[in-house]
């Protein structure tokens, strides 16, 4: 039993405009850090398969999927929105990113591994049912949660999103899906300018003002996320693991440090052990300071890799 690290070479090759913050270097620095710090050999590795059309259609419209397939260029870059574009490797990257999460679900539910981390790009949590947005093509974590419900028969899953940006896409997809609890902390007001509390009981939005640090973040998790998660009693946890709320991040203005990301990971592991037989599938969302990203992902994986699940049912 161990932690599974899933990626695909095309996730590195996915092209973005020169100077774009969501760059290939993000996955390269993570891999280098894991190797330098001895973590690479402490996890199992798997090359992601592509997500199938059926898997994508559980959360995206046929129109959305067709648009991405048609936009994929043979050369150069095709812009899809002001922040989001596709190059020759991007369709493959996006299909393998979603596919990484799907196979992570299968492996974790089969009990072959305790948990999984998907080192993928493009990220996913801004992609809505029918809209590409904010560096995201397919909503990887949503595809995975829907797979767990549809194929594995789970009745309640939770998606925990600590990326600095609100996961508007995940909210859009699961707004009226009571089997999915979506919990988000995010800077607000800030891109994508959604994320205020809503009436839907399965959507737990915690907007945080610019400048908020670890004390405010931890208080929000303990006071607002935890009671909701405990009441919901999820059978599996998904993590939209963005590390752009770090104080060193160039895109946002929250002030978390490495220890805050370690704390939230430990909190999630404790919840998974209590409610979910330890089952966690975590995926990379944002995080744009390369040094902070590499350190925080390495710690996140190290904490996942030390988890133990109960072997009973
Ligand atoms: Zn983000």
Image (cartoon, grey):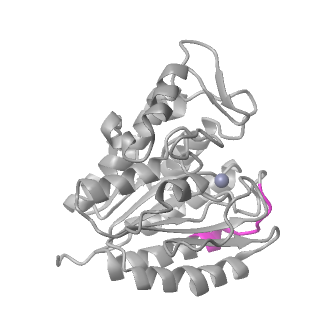
Q: Is residue 256 magenta?
A: yes
| 68 over 154 or under it: above or below | above
Q: Position of residue 210 (x, y in %)?
A: 81, 67
Q: Which is nearer the eye, 47 or 182? A: 182
Q: Where is residue 124 in the image (x, y as percent from the top left)?
A: 53, 46
Quarter assignment of residue 71: top right
| Residue 52 seen anywhere in this rendered image of the structure | no
> Looking at the image, which residue is at 66% across and 43% down?
134
Q: Does the magenta stretch include residue 109?
A: no
Quarter assignment of residue 62: top left
Q: Which residue lies furthest to the left in this view?
A: 312
Q: Which is nearer the eye, 119 or 52? A: 52
Q: In which quarter of the image is the N terminus?
A: bottom left
Q: Position of residue 46 (x, y in %)?
A: 32, 43
Asked whether, in this view, residue 271 is left or right of residue 166, the answer is: left
Quarter assignment of residue 203: bottom right
Q: Which is nearer the eye, 258 or 96? A: 96
Examine the residues drawn in magenta and state their main secondary structure.
loop
Q: Give the range drawn in magenta.
A: 252-261
| Residue 62 seen anywhere in this rendered image of the structure | yes
> Looking at the image, which residue is at 38% across and 57% down?
145
Asked whether, in this view, residue 94 is left or right of residue 213, the answer is: left
């Amino acid at each position: 039993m161990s932690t599974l690290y899933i990626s695909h070479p095309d996730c590195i090759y996915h092209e973005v405009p020169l100077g774009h913050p969501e760059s290939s270097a993000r996955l390269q620095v993570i891999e280098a850090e894991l190797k330098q710090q001895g973590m690479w050999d402490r996890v199992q590795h798997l090359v992601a398969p592509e997500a199938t059309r059926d898997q994508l259609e559980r959360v995206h419209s046929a129109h959305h999927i067709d648009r991405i397939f048609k936009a994929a260029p043979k050369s150069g870059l095709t812009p899809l929105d002001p922040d989001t574009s596709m190059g020759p490797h991007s369709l493959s990257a996006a299909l393998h990113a979603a596919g990484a999460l799907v196979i992570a679900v299968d492996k974790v539910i089969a009990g072959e591994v305790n948990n999984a981390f998907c080192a993928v790009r493009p990220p996913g949590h801004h992609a809505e049912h029918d809209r590409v947005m904010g560096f995201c093509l397919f909503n990887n974590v949503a595809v995975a949660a829907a797979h767990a419900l549809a194929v594995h028969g789970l009745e309640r899953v939770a998606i925990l999103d600590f990326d600095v940006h609100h996961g508007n896409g995940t909210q859009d997809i699961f707004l009226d899906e009571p089997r999915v609890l979506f919990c988000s902390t995010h800077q607000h007001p800030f891109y994508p300018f959604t994320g205020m509390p809503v009436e839907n009981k399965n959507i737990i939005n915690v907007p945080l003002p610019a400048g908020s640090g670890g004390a405010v973040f931890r208080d929000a998790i303990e006071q607002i996320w935890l009671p909701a998660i405990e009441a919901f009693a999820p059978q599996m946890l998904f993590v939209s693991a963005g590390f752009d709320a770090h104080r060193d991040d160039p895109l946002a203005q929250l002030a978390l440090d490495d220890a805050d990301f370690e704390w939230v990971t430990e909190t999630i592991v404790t919840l998974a052990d209590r409610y979910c037989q330890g089952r966690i599938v975590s995926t990379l969302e944002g995080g744009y300071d390369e040094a902070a990203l590499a350190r925080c992902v390495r710690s996140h994986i190290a904490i996942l890799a030390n988890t133990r699940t109960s072997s009973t049912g």
